[in-house]
Image (cartoon, rainbow, N blue to C red):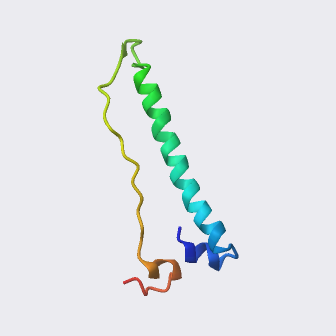
Amino acid sequence: ATIQGFESKGLSKVEAEALLEKSVQIACEARDEFMRRCISGVYEANGNQHTPKPHHILVAASVGSYGAYLADGSEY
């Protein structure tokens, strides 16, 4: 997803930026939920409970090449 790709589908730059920001927010919420579940303990298939060692989990984004949204091979 790119701003240019969203604009080519009729969204404004502001709307496109908001969608990209929302995707980051959703990813962070998923990370936070995962950590909440880990902290409260994980149940294995045999019923045993264990609490995984906490780690700092990052949320990463992938920003592709500008030409990729054109889908005409120009990104290569």
Going by the picture, which residue comes out furthest to the front?
Answer: 14
Question: Which residue is at a point 50% across and 40% down the rendered structure image?
Answer: 30
Residue 26 horizontal/vertical position (percent): 55, 47
Q: Name the quadrant of the C terminus.
A: bottom left
Question: Which residue is at a point 55% across and 55% down the rendered structure image?
Answer: 23
Residue 72 horizontal/vertical position (percent): 49, 86
**Where on the picture, by quarter, is residue 11?**
bottom right
Question: Which residue is at a point 53% across and 71% down the rendered structure image?
Answer: 2
Question: Which residue is at a point 61% across and 72% down the rendered structure image?
Answer: 6
Residue 16 horizontal/vertical position (percent): 61, 68
Q: Is residue 73 above or below residue 12?
A: below
**Where on the picture, by quarter, is residue 44?**
top left
Q: Is residue 19 above or below residue 54?
A: below
Residue 64 horizontal/vertical position (percent): 42, 71
Going by the picture, which residue comes out furthest to the right?
Answer: 10
Nearest the camera: 44 or 61? 61
Lateral position of residue 58 relative to residue 36, left or right: left
**Where on the picture, by quarter, is residue 48?**
top left
Lateral position of residue 57 relative to residue 12, left or right: left
